[in-house]
């Protein structure tokens, strides 16, 4: 009889401990899921940053090539929307700031031209090794009939303060007897 009491007492302790063990297991599982989701989110953000940097680098190379008079370039530009499309922008800007120019481009130049992607949570800056006097006109000497590529294109000013839209671009170097500034005609393929 005493053995039976001991068995029931031991069985009752096991039943009392089961909910506590289940609670511990659920807490551990939730912690593992939380850490896993955080790791996935961090990985996705880093992947997105890499894609943005790659797009900026491709655009930077094309603009530099054309601005230095080395022909024409076709470039597709499409930044992923992982940092919020409405709050994000990509711009070509001229800066008169020795510290910023030195940080982005190296050297000790006071003036520089930068390609900048900005969003509320991420900024990427690339130095454009072109003359700050480079212009991207939307009129003469650029005209839609001078594109030289298949399809319909619209002329765009890549230094427009509204920013550079995603799309396919055709960049052409132009020379004008009226201007000593480098001229880049930027054509964006119509949708």
Image (cartoon, rainbow, N blue to C red):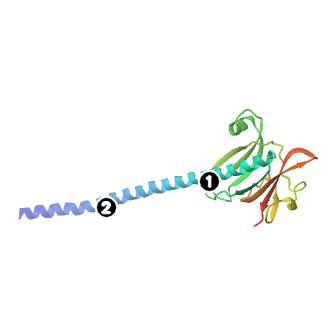
Query: Residue 57: x percent and y percent?
Result: 68, 49
| Quadrant (top left/top right/bottom left/bottom right) for the N terminus | bottom left
Q: Nearer the viewer, residue 41 or 189?
A: 189
Name the residue at 52% across, 55% down.
41
Name the residue at 80% across, 58% down.
187
Q: Is residue 113 visible?
A: yes
Q: Is residue 119 visible?
A: no
Query: Residue 115: x percent and y percent?
Result: 72, 47
Q: Nearer the viewer, residue 113 or 168?
A: 168
The disc placed on residue 22 is 2
Name the residue at 79% across, 47% down.
70
Query: Position of 22 compared to 142: left or right?
Result: left
Task: Specify the farthest residue to the right.
Answer: 178
Q: CA separation, marks 1 and 2? A: 43 Å
Question: Which comes sooner in the sequence, label 1 or label 2?
Answer: 2
SS for callout 2: helix
The residue to which callout 1 is attached is 51
When asked about the image quadrant of residue 13, the answer is bottom left
Q: Is residue 153 above or below residue 49?
A: below
Q: Nearer the viewer, residue 157 or 97?
A: 157
Task: Specify the farthest residue to the bottom.
Answer: 191
Task: Specify the farthest residue to the top.
Answer: 108
Q: Residues within 10 Å of mark 1 (few under 14, many from 20)?
A: some
């Amino acid at each position: 009889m005493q053995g039976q009491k001991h068995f029931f007492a031991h069985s009752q302790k096991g039943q009392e401990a089961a909910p506590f063990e289940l609670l511990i297991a659920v807490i551990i599982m939730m912690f593992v899921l939380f850490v896993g989701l955080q790791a996935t989110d961090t990985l996705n953000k880093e992947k997105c940053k890499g894609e943005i940097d790659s797009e900026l680098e491709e655009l930077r190379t094309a603009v530099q090539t054309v601005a230095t008079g080395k022909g024409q370039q076709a470039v597709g530009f499409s930044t992923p929307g992982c940092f919020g499309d409405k709050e994000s922008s990509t711009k070509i800007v001229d800066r008169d700031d020795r510290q910023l120019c030195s940080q982005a481009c190296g050297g000790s130049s006071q003036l520089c031209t930068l390609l900048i992607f900005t969003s509320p949570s991420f900024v990427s800056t690339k130095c454009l090794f072109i003359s700050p006097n480079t212009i991207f006109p939307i009129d003469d000497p650029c005209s839609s009939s001078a594109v030289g590529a298949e399809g319909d294109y619209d002329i765009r000013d890549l230094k427009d303060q509204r920013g550079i839209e995603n799309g396919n671009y055709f960049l052409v170097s132009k020379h004008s007897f009226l201007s000593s500034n480098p001229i880049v005609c930027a054509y964006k393929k119509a949708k």
